[in-house]
Amino acid sequence: MGCEFTLNHFAETIEQVKRRFTLLTFKDSSERDEDTGSVIFLRHDVDHSIEDAVTLAEVEKARGVCATYFVQLHCPFYTAMDVRGQRCLQAMRAMGHEVGFHYDVSYYTATGRDVVSSFKEDLTLLGELVGEEIVSISRHDPAAESIGADTLRQINAAVPYNAYADEFFKDIKYISDSTCHWRSGCWCQHLKEPTDMQIVIHPVWWVNDAPEWQEKLRQSCRRSMNRYSAGIEEVIDCYQTCLRERAERDKLFQLYNPSD
């Protein structure tokens, strides 16, 4: 079995995990007891495509496991707030996965917003989109920009579970596929050890089958662009219909919106 960034290898590794570990979402971490055994918190940071996240969620659902998907609200590559985005959030929740907030401090500072109050507003908004309270967070690119200790304390105090809290980050093994590179070998190579772990998987690396990480990003981006292009064509068709039927539509508008 090769250690490629592919859906096949992801699915194979999930099967190994199931035989040796208990998979817990962050919100279910308090349910652990003496009989639980070694635990893996499987975390997905959705940085580039919410559709890629749903694809990975379906692979996990088919194998009877759940994970935590940390979603952004101000990502330049997707939106969770349009119809497609909300359907993706609802789909992940319906499959039993947890949706958490992948907050981005750089967005708040770049737009001149107060970090703490804006974070809390977004936390509430994401909960409304998902349909349940958001209780878990992970910070996007935590090394990129420093924030004050008091600001960080207020953010962390707003939710019960923080992926970078000591109990999930320092007290257990932490493995991440950040930038499509493992620092200490593929996650499948760590499963023989009976130890608790947090494993961070970014869907974009696994869902897209291009051999190089740069092309995986481009592949995901092209799919998004194709969807937007198809949407534009639908808008053009709609506008052309409106132009053809303008006289009739104007009469209806006057009928239902009479002037005073």
Image (cartoon, grey):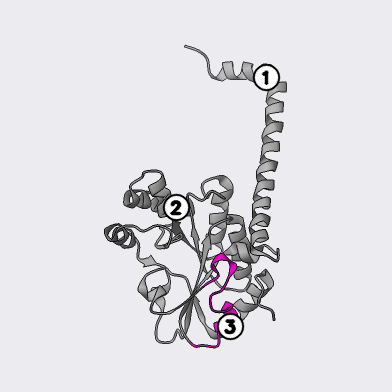
Q: Does the magenta stretch include residue 183?
A: yes
Q: Distance between the residues labelled 3 and 1?
A: 65 Å
Q: List x then y, in percent, for residue 83.
A: 57, 46
Q: Which callout, 1 or 2, points at the residue further toward the start of the chain?
A: 2
* 36 and 224: which is toward the camera: 224
Q: Which callout, 3 or 1, points at the residue further toward the start of the chain?
A: 3
Q: Which portion, as a residue range, is magenta? A: 176-194
* Label 1 crowd bin: few (<14), some (14–19), many (20+), radius 10 Å: few
**Tag on residue 246?**
1
Q: Is residue 156 magenta?
A: no
The answer to whether residue 172 is left or right of residue 48 is left
> Of tags 1 and 2, which is closer to the observer?
2
Q: What residue type is labelled 1?
A: Arg
* 158 and 165: which is toward the camera: 165
Q: Which amino acid does label 3 sit on?
A: Gln
Q: List x then y, in percent, for residue 133.
A: 40, 57
As drawn, 43 above or below 190: above
Q: In this figure, which residue is indicated by the disc labeled 2?
A: 126
Q: In this figure, which residue is indicated by the disc labeled 3?
A: 189
Q: Distance between the residues labelled 3 and 2?
A: 35 Å
Looking at the rendered structure, the secondary structure element under dot 2 is helix
* 214 and 196: which is toward the camera: 214
